[in-house]
Image (cartoon, rainbow, N blue to C red):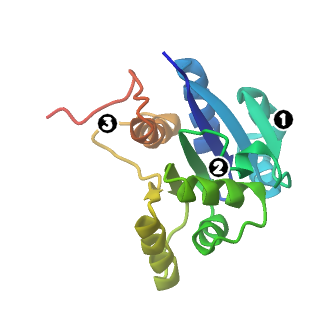
Amino acid sequence: MLKKRIIIAMSGASGAIYGLRLLEKLRMGGLAETHLIMTRSAERTLYLETGKLGAEAKEMADVSYPVEDIGCRLASGSFPVDAMVVAPCSIHSMSAIAGGISSNLLVRAADVTLKERRKLILMVRETPLHLGHLRTMVNLAEMGAILAPPVAAFYTKPESVLDIVDHSVDRVLDLLGLPSAEAKRWDH
């Protein structure tokens, strides 16, 4: 079976564990080739929230790219990719993607993903949301993006923070067509 090629982008929003856990699960499953982009803010947030360095996250990916490398292969539609996930996705990154403002590789890769009609999943991390945020989300949905904010589900009876994180990550894996065998499902 051919591995799916997935771009994982981490922005500076709180919730670095979502990107980290997605990388872990994709690596464990062995069904995806992962290409990682981390903003400088993502590296800072990762350290503040988990004590891990950006280099540790980059080691979990098959390939990683500097966020400034706007000329790398991820910036071109001719490089075949199956999907892109921004986990976590800051409002700043979400807004730049919606506006097509390709000021860094994360935004450019997302723009390419949309223009090539590939799957773009945004794990937007913000609350509460004002009308501008909601309108931006509507614009992105109309452009073809999937908005998948991490939302806790309690029917799974989580016993730890990791259980709550895994539920949202497992939903993203479903969207990628790479379901986790360990995912807890609604079964009533």
User: Splitting the image into 4 quarters, where does residue 65 fall?
Assistant: top right
Judging by the rendered image, the residue that carries numbered circle 3 is 156
How far apart are labels 1 and 3 at the CA level?
A: 33 Å
* 3 vs 2, front mark: 2
The residue positioned farthest toward the front in the image shown: 78
Q: Does residue 117 appear anywhere in the picture? A: yes
How far apart are labels 3 and 2 at the CA level?
A: 39 Å
Query: Hey, what amino acid is under mark 2?
Result: Gly
**Where residue 73 appears, x then y in whole percent?**
76, 43
* 2 vs 1, front mark: 2
Q: Are marks 3 and 2 in contact (CB under 8 Å)?
A: no
Query: Please, what secondary structure does the residue beneath circle 2 have?
Result: loop
How many C-alpha atoms fall within 10 Å of the one at disc 2: few (<14), some, or many (≥20)? Answer: some
Query: Please, what secondary structure does the residue beneath circle 3 have?
Result: loop
Judging by the rendered image, the residue that carries numbered circle 1 is 55
Judging by the rendered image, the residue that carries numbered circle 2 is 77
- Image: 170 above or below 106: above
The residue positioned farthest toward the left in the image shown: 188
Q: Which of marks 2 and 1 is nearer the N terminus?
A: 1
Residue shown at the point (48%, 39%) measured from the top left: 169
